[in-house]
Image: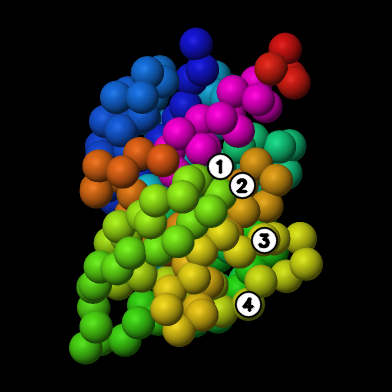
Amino acid sequence: TTRVGVLALQGDFREHIAVLRGLGADAVPVRRPAELDEIDGLVIPGGESSVMDKLSRAFGLAEPLRRAIAGGLPVYGTCAGLIMLADRILDGIAGQESLGGLDVSVRRNAFGSQVDSFETDLDIPAVGDEPMHAVFIRAPIVESVGPAATPLARVADGRVVAVEQGDLLGTSFHPEITGDTRFHEYFLGKVRAAALRAA
Ligand code: GLN
């Protein structure tokens, strides 16, 4: 079976593990570099990207993660996880680093303090015809998309909130908490295809 790691340093990794297990995947928490060798894909959860950045460096995971991403590991980041995957953070805290991989610039907490969190329905043709109910919690937006990445979804004003680049996926919102598993299924499809290619 396909084994999917969920980066379990901080944030809502338990929710991702539950969704992935519900879809039949062998989902495991990842906290140590050696665990990266045992997985076919990785989810980086929502949480707080500056804290996740500090912890990943303190645990010696940041460089192994960068190497794994560069080596083609499929990775799906939600919210803070999208920030971790972005090549450019426009408003990180001092010294904040991302892992990179997605050719995008993100802005954290981009929907402003009055609109901390909101929900809306998004059209995401890549995952199906039915609109997806999306929950945004102090969410980042993708302010610009470079040539290597493709936008998958936009909010009503046109701002990009989901992107794809090869086997990397990122969403500003949190499909792990709404019961709509289509993004996780889409990601598992990438993970299984990549595992077959590698076998
Ligand atoms: N605002 C958080 C950050 O900058 C992300 C919030 C979330 O993951 N729900 O990391």
* Left or right of 112 on screen, residue 3: right
What is the x, y in percent for residue 135? Answer: 28, 62
Q: Label 1: which residue? A: 75
Q: Residues within 10 Å of mark 4 (few under 14, many from 20)?
A: some
Q: Residues within 10 Å of mark 1 (few under 14, many from 20)?
A: many
- In the rendered structure, which disc, 1 or 2, sits on the residue that comes first in sequence? 1
Q: Which mark is residue 168?
A: 2
Q: Amino acid at mark 3?
A: Thr
- In the rendered structure, which disc, 2 or 3, sits on the residue that comes first in sequence? 3
The answer to whether mark 3 is within 8 Å of ligand 1 is: no
Q: Residue furthest front?
A: 129
In depth, the one of 70 and 125 nearer the eye is: 125
Q: Which residues are magenta?
A: 183-195
- In the rendered structure, which disc, 3 or 1, sits on the residue that comes first in sequence? 1
Q: Amino acid at mark 1?
A: Val
Give yes or no for residue 192 being in the magenta stretch. Answer: yes
Q: Amino acid at mark 4?
A: Ser
Is 79 rendered above or below residue 27? below
* Left or right of 6 on screen, residue 16: left
Q: CA distance from mark 4 to mark 1?
A: 20 Å
Q: CA distance from mark 3 to mark 1?
A: 15 Å
What is the x, y in percent for residue 3? Answer: 48, 20
Q: Which mark is residue 144?
A: 4
> Element at badge 3?
strand
Q: Label 3: which residue? A: 150
> Element at badge 1?
strand
The residue sitting at 24% across, 48% down in the picture is 177
Q: CA distance from mark 4 to mark 2?
A: 16 Å
The residue sitting at 31% across, 43% down in the picture is 180
